[in-house]
Image: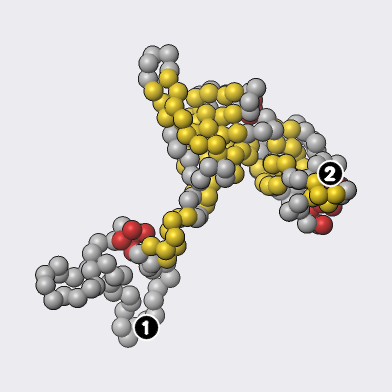
Amino acid sequence: MKKGILGRKLGMSQIFMADGRMIPVTVIEATPNTVVQVKTVEKEGYNAVQVGFGDVKQIKENVYKGVGKQAQGHFKQAGVEPKKVLKEFRFDDISSYKVGDTIACSSFAVGDIVDVVGKSKGKGYAGVIKRWNAQRVGSMSHGTGPIHRSVGSMAANSDPSRVFKNKHMAGELGNERVTIKNLEIVRVDEARNLLFIKGGVPGAKGTVVVVKA
């Protein structure tokens, strides 16, 4: 990984190019990420840069909303203001990063191909047809009973007499980590800390996403 940043999904819009083409884009607010810790092979066993994103409300002196005592001590040791989200990036070269530095959206350029990671929208409980695109079960003729949208056969009978792992069954749909690869950055607004990425990215408005290249 060469570069990465944490941002907040603001929603979707559209951009008109010079040749008249209209491109749907997702707008991501990527305010500067603060470097909280630099991990090295000698000390932690691997190279990584830990960054913080999102300001938190200060309730009183040395007390921040939603930040535990251990986390506050971690930020205090680094000498940076507490952040809402922490994330590690395993960059190819970490020699240029120091604690307290910031990573801004200007590190990306128009035309960069990036991967975006986010948590998809939760859609509640769903059956196997909606959740896994399964086919209907049984004949649709009269008298077959209400079995058409059921899960169908569950497992072998005598051997192994159990349901295999990863069996497609009904359950929660969405609300899982999703990665969309090879998306193009079509505009970078450094003044407003905005990234305009072609196409859609996972997550609802206001959720935190990871942009990496």
48 left or right of 200 in image: right
Say which quadrant the N terminus sits in: top right
Residue at 50% across / 46% down in the picture? 203
Rendered position, 52 above or below 126: above
Q: Where is residue 70 in the image (x, y as percent from the top left)?
A: 81, 57
Q: Residue 51 carries which label?
A: none
Mark 1: few/some/many CA within 10 Å (<14, 14-19, 20+): few
SS assignment at label 2: helix
Which color scheme does this rendered protein use?
secondary structure
Q: Which mark is residue 161?
A: 1
Q: Which of marks 1 and 2 is in front?
A: 2
SS assignment at label 1: loop
Residue at 70% across / 47% down in the picture? 84
Q: How far apart are marks 1 and 2 (CA)?
A: 55 Å
Q: Earlier in the sequence, mark 1 or mark 2?
A: 2
What amino acid is found at the position of numbered circle 1 in the picture? Ser
Q: Where is residue 54 in the image (x, y as percent from the top left)?
A: 69, 41
